[in-house]
Image (cartoon, rainbow, N blue to C red):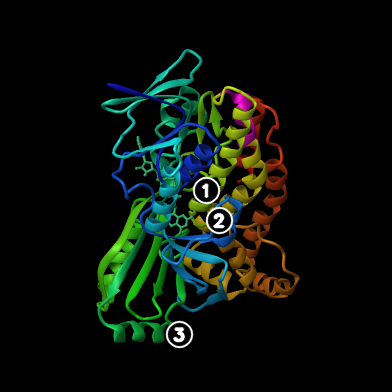
Amino acid sequence: MKTHRSDVLIIGAGPAGAHLASLLGRAGLTVILLDKNPAGEAGAQWVNGIPLWVFEQAGLDKPGPDEVHGAGARFTLIDPTHQARVSILAPFLLDIDMREFGARLLRTAESSPNVQVFHEILIQSFDIDTHGRPQRAYSQNDCFQAELFVDVSGLAAVVRKNTPFLKELCPGVEPTDLCRAAQEVRHINNPLGALEFLEIQKAQSGEILSWVGIAGGFSLLRVQISQDLKTIAFLTGTRALFGVPSGAKLIQNFVAKNPWVGDKIFGGQRAIPLRFPYGNLIAPGVALVGDSACQVYSAHGSGIGMGLLAAKQLAVTVIEAAHRGQDLGSLTALWPYAYEFHKQYGALLAVSDLSRRFSQTLSPYEVHQMIAGGMMTEGVLKSSLLQQQPEVALGELPQQIRGLFTAPGLAVRLGLLFAKVPKILWAARQYPEQPDLQKVIAYERRLLKWL
Ligand SMILES: Cc1cc2nc3c(=O)[nH]c(=O)nc-3n(C[C@H](O)[C@H](O)[C@H](O)COP(=O)(O)OP(=O)(O)OC[C@H]3O[C@@H](n4cnc5c(N)ncnc54)[C@H](O)[C@@H]3O)c2cc1C
C-alpha cells in the first residue's frame, strides 16, 4: 500500500473541492484532491443555476462563454393549475454548464505545483486516534495522511459518517428532507411542436417556465426551450416520498406527452439534502464543505453557490492558521471557518429552510392562491433566485395585503410563518465566536425549534 502525505486531503473533486484545493495550493499548502469518479466526472455534470454575485464573493472569475449555458432569461413561475404566473427578467442568474465550469476549476487546481489530483480513488475507511481525530484515510490500494481532512464528498459524507464526533452530532438527512432532482438537455426533433407548446403556454423561446407544486409541495418542473428551438433544458425536483414521482420521472412524463422532444444530450440525477447546515462544520482534523455539511439554499435545493462560498471561507481560515504555525486540524485553527460561515449565511439559510418547510405543506390550490393572490411577488421571486434574504418592498405590500384577504386560511398560516422570522434571525446570531461545543449545540437546537 502506498502512503501519500499532504497538509490537507480533500475528498470530493466537485467545484467546491476543486476551488478549495486551488486556493490552498496557491497559498503554499500541500494538497491532495481526490475523487472516486474518473476524470471529467466529478461533481455535478449538468446545468446548474448560480447567481452572478457568488462568483465574485467566492473569489472566482466570471464564467466564460463556453461555461454559460444560458443567461439573462425571463423567469416565469407558474402555479400547478396553469392559471397564475409571476414573471421577471433575471440577468443576475447564470445557467452554468457544470461540465465546463468544473473542468476549469480542476485545471486551475492542477496548475498549482502544490496540488496533486487523483481520480478513481474511493475512500473507504479511516484510522481514528483516541481523541476521535482521523490520522489516515484508506482506499483499496492507497493510504493518505494529512493534518486536515476536508469532506466535500456530497451526500456520501464519507468523513462525517466515519468520525465519531460528527457522526453523533450531525444526524443523517431524513428521506423527507431529500430532493430527488434531475437535469437534462435534450434535442428538439420538431421545432413546430416546440412553437405550438410555447404558444399554448403564452411564452417565448429562451424563457424559463417553472411549474411549482405540480407533484405535491416542494416540487418543480422547469422547462427552457432554446432561442434557436434546437434544444430543451429540464430541471426537476420532488421530495423523496413514497408515491411521489422522482424528478427524473417528471421529465419522462413530459417527454412522453410531447413527442417533439428528442433524445438526451447530457444531464444527470441525484438527491440533494434539504436542511439547515449543521452547526458543527468542524471536528478535530475535519472540516465539512458543501452537501456533506448541508450548505444548501434549501428553498430550491441549490448547493453550488453555498459550497463555493464555504470553500473560500475555509481556505481563508486554513491559510491564516498556517501563517500562525497552528496545527491545521485543531479546533482553535478551524473555528473561524464555522463561525464566519454561520455568521454570514446562517440566517439566510435558516429562513430559506423555513420557506422550504412551508412550501412542502402547500396544497396545489394554496400554491395557486400564493401566485394568483399576489403574495408571491416579483420581489420575492427575485430574492429567492438571487439566494438573498427577501426584503419587504413597500410597492408590493398593497398587492400582498389584498391577496391575504382573498385567502384567509393561507393568510393565517403565512402570519404564523412570518412570526417565526425574527426569532430565527435572533437565534442565527448566536453562533459562538470562540470554540464552545455546548453553545453550538444550543444554537442548532434553537434554530431547529423555530423552523
Ligand atoms: C439534477 C440536479 C440539479 C441541481 N441544480 C442545481 C442548481 O441549479 N443550482 C445549484 O446551486 N445547485 C443545484 N443542485 C445541487 C448541487 O448540484 C449540489 O448541491 C452540489 O453539487 C453539491 O456539491 P458537493 O461538492 O458538495 O457534492 P457533489 O457534487 O456531490 O460532489 C461530491 C464528490 O465526491 C465524490 N465522492 C463521494 N464519495 C467519495 C468517496 N468515498 N471517495 C472519493 N470521492 C467521493 C463524488 O464522486 C463527487 O464527485 C442540483 C443537484 C441536482 C442533482
CA–CA distance between discs 3 and 2?
Answer: 33 Å
Residue placed under numbered mark 2 in the picture: 55
Total labels: the figure holds 3
Q: Quadrant of the N terminus?
A: top left
**Which residue is located at x 70 percent, y 32 percent?**
433
- Residue sitting nearer the eye, 396 or 345: 345
Classify 10 Å Cα crowding around label 3: few (below 14), some (14-19), many (20 and above).
few
The reply to whether the C-beta atoms of the residues labelled 3 and 2 are less than 8 Å apart is no
Q: Position of residue 397 (x, y in %)?
A: 72, 71
Dot label at residue 321? none
Q: Secondary structure at mark 3?
A: loop
Q: Is residue 345 magenta?
A: no
Residue placed under numbered mark 1 in the picture: 308
Q: Position of residue 267 (x, y in %)?
A: 32, 60
Residue placed under numbered mark 3 in the picture: 202
Three-letter residue code for mark 1: Leu
